[in-house]
Every structure is written in structure tokens, then in C-alpha cells.
Image (cartoon, rainbow, N blue to C red):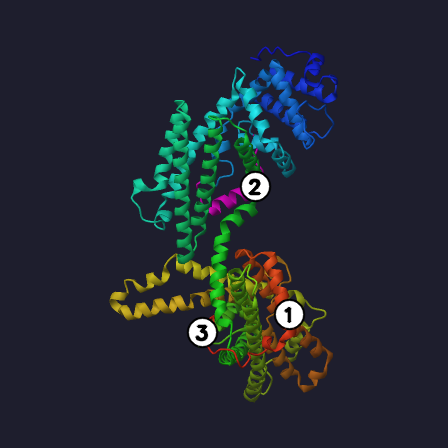
Amino acid sequence: MPIEVPLPAAEPFGLIVAGAQPKHRAIVRLHALFVDMGRCEMLEEQVKCLLLLMRWLRSGRSIPTSPDAEAKDSPMTTRLRLLLLSLEQVEGAREAFASALNGVITQARAIDLFARLGLPEDRSFLSEMIDRLWRWVLPEGLDDRDPIQLLGRLFPSRVALSELGAIPPELFNRLLCVLARTKSQPGALLTSSMQDALRLLALRIAASGLFDALRRRSPQTPLDESPFFQLPQVANEYIAQMDAHAPEESLAEVRERAKKLVESCQVVVAAVVENLERSGVSVDVVYRLEAIGKGLRRYLDLVAVLAEGNQPATGRERARLLVTLVDARLREGELREIVRSNLHLLARKIIERAGETGDHYITSSRKEYFHLLSSAAGGGVLTVGTTVLKYLIMWVHFAPLVEGILSAANYAGSFLVMQLLGFTLATKQPSMTAAAVAASMRKQAGQNDLSGLVTMIARVTRSQLAAATGNLGLVIPAAAVFDFYWRTQHGTSFLDADTAAYILHSLSLFGSGTVFYAALTGALLWTASIGAGWFENFSVYRQIPQAIETHRLRKFLGRGVTGWASRAFHRNVSGVGGNVTLGVLLGMTPVVGKFVGLPLDVRHVTLSTGALTLAVCAQGKESLFSHEFRDAMLGVVVIGILNFGVSFILALLVALRAKDVGIRDRFRLLMSVGATLVRSPLQFLFPPASATEGSVHGPVSRRGNV
């Protein structure tokens, strides 16, 4: 039943609240809202009244100022002061407001506001992603009993959050003091909900912290000494003392114990993260760690807010918690937030493992430089075979899917053979070396002397040029030799006239999609490096090398064989993952394009150079002077630039973000590189004679990360 509210009429109410402006439009509207609050009985009516009151608070129209107004007040703060004045001076208004608020708190699940909002639920990262994506496609229906939805409706935007953050904290304390003078006392219900939320949070954090996957990676301690095990006990003790009105000294002692337990839990989480850094990252484990971290912060927030109720308070903790909850509600549906917070560690580890591979592509001495040049030459020769198989597969006219699978097998098989023989494919280098550069930038961030980092970039540049020179310098004569051999055996060139003409046209910079396809291939090369890092991380996390070494076949094959297999797998796992990934991407991209109706294709500089050489051999020497050949040559140059450039830039940007390298350090590095390039350009092309024979990265390895 509606309560009897002794609320004055509009004009007397206006005289009490606004003095000289009793009939101001805003005052009349506020009086009408209090009248409606006193009459409403159903939950939906009470929710509507609160939403209308919030709309009144956020209105930007002029309003009479209260006696305690300050010049720096925002419009919302000015209206809030007027609202507090009316609640303090008019008992009917106070009781009407408290009655509506009490009805909402009583019927809504207020505990969810403090124990669920902004905190990851106890499920996997993938499940949370799917749930957020579904809510983005089909928003949830309105539920007046859901306090989280209500908070989002009260503060629906970042502008509303900014206005809330500008409110002085002492006004929140005044509001609670006003509510404490009412018959319904909704503030007591909120306190009770926060106590229950504290208990629930403690139990959830304890369950997550003692989860098997985390406990195995945590420091070994007896169960009853684990801070996660003790967290619920301290929460229950704190609330019990609050209910018993224990002295403030006793409450302060329990609060201090709770804070120390939270710090101990954070130490355990840091130890688990350090373990993941060494033994591989799991997204689901990181998701649980993220949930624990946010839960611990909320635990401390609730302890601080509850403490304000037992001592002279300024309302600072209450204001901070409310801003935190509103911000969490606004972030709740964002896919970017969960991806950023949970994949950052995984991205960093993948980049680090790619960077470790990239170290093997960076030469510092002339011996290493010429070794890389010779291995790249071998890669160029082998690429001719890949090009020949590509056209043999194409001429059979398989179904698109079969052709894509065979093309992927051709590319992947060729890259794996290069790996086994220790050859190098130049286009695989940029994405790997970029990760190594980013790692060095993070180590030297903030330092004044960047000469070591600039020297490393010079080494990367000349190593990349050496690999490209070796690939392209040998693929041309190797393709010409193959065509000569084919002509002696079959009486004709390997390519027919139509295929040769098609190759010249497809590589032309004008009238074809060469630029787009070359950039797309650069993106695929970068994606392959991510695949290599992910596969190595997966191997380390799942302890696959150890599983191979201790496999039951060891009884029959012997320890030496399984040990050798384990070391070989660990040494080559990144290369195999990257090569297979790149092969599948290059082979299946055109097939996917046909399937979805998009003109997708790939343009790889080494393969394109080999194909162009075979086309010229088929058309004869006179084709060298044609404009089609000139356009195709220009296209190959652009393909090389885009293959290397797009791959390196994407890898460097992602690595810099994963390594948390700031914009200032990036700019300083760019200026240092530019100055060095002007002073000593030759070191970017060829190793100086004074370079040490031993690289700071270790000698160029033959582990074959192509």
C-alpha cells in the first residue's frame, strides 16, 4: 500500500528549498517526483521514479543554487546539492525517496551489484567471449529486479560516468546520513548486501585460487596456510564483529589482517604468472588469474566501504566504489576489454618466442653474414621446385578444395625441406626480427644511450638484405637452368605461351591486384610468425618435449632415441608451426576467396620472381624489352617491398604493444636511427670489418626456422 506522505504543497515546498524562486520549473518538477515516489507501490513504478529523478539530476537547464553551492560545481553537483537540501529539510520528501529506494533494494538482487558486476564469472575465456558476443548481437531484456541493469540505465554513458566522478565525496556521505534518519532505512539494506557480497567474493576467490591448474603453479604450502584458504574466514570474522558492534580497534585489526591476506594472495598470483612466463601461457589460466585479481580489488573496496560506516567518514570510499561499478557496467559488454586483459600475456609470450627465433636471423659478423647469404641462396634454389609444382598442380584442374590442399602441401612441404636443410626464406625474417627488436626496445626503454639498439637495427637491416639477395640472386639462374633442362628433355619450355602471358599480366603493377595481393601476403607472413610462436608456447605449456622423452616407447627404443626426439622436437617446433601455418595460408587463401566470392590471391616475391623468370624463358629474349616485362618487373619490386614492409610493420606494432614500449621511446629510437643512417649508411648494408665474430644473439643457428 502507498504510504501516507506528509509532503507540503508545491509552493510551500518551493519556499523551503528554493527560497526566492519557489515556482522555478526545476523545483516544481522535483516536487512532482516526490509526490509520485510517495504513491508508487509496484517495483516497476519505483524504478521509473528513480530513473526520472536521475534524468532531473543530469538535466543541464538552469536551477536555483543551494546555500552550500560552490563555483566549481558541475550542473549535476548543483542539482544534487538542491536534492540533498530538500531531503534534509522536508521530512515528506525524505520518506518518499527512502520508500521508493527501499522498495527497489528489497526486491532487487543487490548482492549482484557488488559481487558480480565487473568481475569475470567462473567459466572459460571462450565461454565469456561467446556470451559477450551474443549479448552484443541480441541485448538482454529489461529486468527491473536486476540491479546491474538498473545501474546501467541510471548511468548509460561515459558522459554520465564523468559527471558522477565530478561529485564531491562528502555529498555521498550526506545522502547516507539523510537515509539513516528515515523509517525504511535503505542504507542498512545496502550495508547488509555488501556484507553478503564480501562473504561470497571471499568464497569465489578461494575456490579460484585453489583451482588445480593454479595450485600446481603456486608456491607449495600446507592448505590451511594458504592465503586463499584463510580469506573467507577473515571475511566472516570481520562481519561478525561489525554485527556485534565491536570496538574500532578490534575492527581495524581484522581489516589489517584482511589487507595482508590480499597482499599474500597477490604474491601467489604473481608467482603463478612468473611460472607461466617460463612454462607457457594458457588463456583459461590467465582468465582465472584476471578474475582473482579483480575479485581481490573488489574485496578491498568492500572492506574500505564497510569501514566508513564504523568511523567518521567523508564518503570517499563510497564514491570511489560507485564510480568503479558504473565504469564496470559500461565495460561489461565490450569485447575489446576481455581480449585486451586476457590475451595480453599470451600475446607477449608468443612475441617473445617469435623474437627468440628472430635472433637467429640477425647477423653481427661477416662470417655470420656470408653464412646467411649462402643459406638464403639455397632457399632460392629450392623455391624453383616449389614454383614448378605450383603450376603442375594448377594444370591438372582439380576441384578448388583439392587444389588448395595440394597447394598448401606444396608450400608447407617446401618450407619444411628448407628448414631441414638449414636454408632461409627471406620473407619469413621481418616478422621474426621485429619481435626481437621490440624486446630490445623494452629492455632499453628510458635509457639515454640507444647506440646498442640502433646497432641491432642496422644488423637486422643488412641481414634482411642479405637474405633477400640470396633468395632472388639464385632463384633467377636456378629457374633458367631448370627451363633449359626441361627444354632439352621435352623440346619446349616448361610454361606454354598462354601461361607465360598470364604470369606477366598477373605480376603487372598496373591493371591487376598486385599491390593488394602483395600486402595481403605480407599480412599472411606475419600471421605465420604468430602461429609459430603460439605453437611453441602450446608445446611448452603442455610439456610435449618431456612427454616425448618419457613416452612408453622408451622401453623399446631406448632413452637415447626418445631423448634425441625430444630435443629435436623442441628445437624445430617453432619452425614447423610457422612453416605449416604459412603453407596453409598461401595455399588456401585463393580457395577461400573463390568460396566467398572475393578475388583473393597471394603474391610472394621469391615465388613471383621464379615464375617471371620461367615466363621470360618461354617467351624468349625479345620479351625482355617489352613493356609487359617492365611492368611485371616493377610489380615484383613492389611485391618485395610490401611483403617485407607489411610483415615487419605489423609484427613491430604488435610486439611494441605487447612489450609495453611507449610512444616516446619509439620516437627517440626513430630519431637515433635516422641520425646513424646519415652518419654511417654502409653499416645498414654490410658488416663493418671491426664487427666481432661472436654475435650478441649467438651465432646464426641451423635450427632452420626458414
Q: Earlier in the sequence, mark 2 or mark 1?
A: 2
Most prominent secondary structure in the magenta stretch?
helix
- The residue wearing badge 2 is 331
Query: Residue 66, how many percent across, how many down?
Result: 68, 23
The magenta region covers: 122-142
Of residues 368 and 109, which is closer to you in this image? 368
Tell me the element at label 2: helix
In the rendered image, the vertical position of residue 663 relative to residue 46, given as above or below: below
Tell me the element at label 3: loop
Of residues 430 and 406, which is closer to you in this image? 430
Q: CA distance from mark 3 to mark 2?
A: 46 Å
Q: CA distance from mark 3 to mark 1?
A: 31 Å
Q: Are marks 3 and 2 in contact (CB under 8 Å)?
A: no
- The residue wearing badge 1 is 675
- Looking at the image, is mark 3 or mark 1 nearer the viewer? 1
Query: Residue 356, how many percent across, how many down?
Result: 47, 66
- The residue wearing badge 3 is 701
Kindly identify the amino acid type of the residue bearing the numbered disc 3. Answer: Ser
Q: Earlier in the sequence, mark 3 or mark 2?
A: 2
Query: Residue 541, how many percent across, how many down?
Result: 40, 57
Q: Visible in this render: residue 39?
A: no
User: Would you say 417 lies left or right of 672 here?
Assistant: left
